[in-house]
Amino acid sequence: MTETKEPAPVPRPAPPASGMRLFAHALRMLAANAPATLRIVALPLGLLMLVQLAMDRIGRLIFAARGSEAGPPPVLFILDFALALSMLFVLGWMAVAWHRFILCDERPGLAPSLHPRAILAYFGRGVIAALVVLTILFLPMTLSAFLLGRLGLGPGSSLALVISLVMNTVTTWLVLVLAPMLVGAAIGRPTGVADAFRTTGGFLSALLVAAFLFTLFSMGIGWLLMQVRFTLGHFAPTAAPLVTLLVNAVVMMTGFSLLTTVHGHVVEKRPLG
């Protein structure tokens, strides 16, 4: 008589409260590794700032040579495209360096290690993630814009802010669901969209809470940044771009840390502490 094997127990979904622990752990990782965080951020952002200043200077010289009435020359679009590519490369550089530092114990030196293949893979997975998000949210975003237009409400209205909070939360949630695909590309363990959804399937409510907290965090930081920029515009206008860059770096690194936390806890079963 053959023995029948009992089916493996289905793991219980993670409670929504786990999302608070995920977000808190992401913040703790940044605070506990502040020196490494600075080394990962400093050089890439410094180079990006130099590129931005150089292109801004070139653009001013071109406008001065052509005259303001001639309109923007085509070369400015090329410069803007080059700047956008530079920003994407820097973001990928920082993200890959942080993921590999936390998950692979690859400590940065004076500058973060450069992994061109991993950065390209990360960028490719990012494009796929963006397409997934746009496919899912295209109809809700279109209907929301139509509703606001019909009601004659601007972006500063209460309804627009609520819609923005919901859309940003859902967008962040989808990105967190796809975290195994993104982070896996950075650490050399590639996975696909279906595998990412399957891996994070038991954490959907927890990831939604984490996404909501990150959205509140980023929107709150954005509001504070607007107030600071307004103040600096009167007293130190030249410092406004630097402050904007630094504040945005904090938000971006928090997002990278949250992605790393999700991958480490969900995929690698690391404790949250």
Image (cartoon, rainbow, N blue to C red):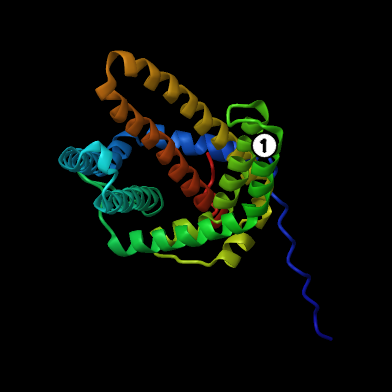
Residue furthest bottom in the image: 1
Instruction: Inspect the image, locate mark 1, and give the three-letter code of the amino acid beneath it.
Output: Leu
Query: Is 250 positioned to the left or the right of 237 in the image?
Result: right
Query: Where residue 62 appears, x then y in whole percent?
Result: 18, 43
**Looking at the image, which is closer to me, 222 or 30?**
222
**Looking at the image, which is closer to me, 31 or 229?**
229
From the viewer's perspective, is residue 23 above or below residue 94? above
Quarter of the image that includes the N terminus: bottom right
From the viewer's perspective, is residue 133 above or below residue 154? below
**Looking at the image, which is closer to me, 194 or 99?**
194
Residue 178 in sight from this viewpoint: yes
The crowding category of the residue bearing disc 1, from other C-alpha atoms within 10 Å (few below 14, some 14 to 19, many at least 20), is some
Residue plotted at (42% across, 63% down): 124
Residue 187 in sight from this viewpoint: no
From the viewer's perspective, is residue 267 above or below residue 35? below
Residue furthest top in the image: 235
Residue plotted at (58% across, 41% down): 168
Residue plotted at (62% across, 53% down): 138
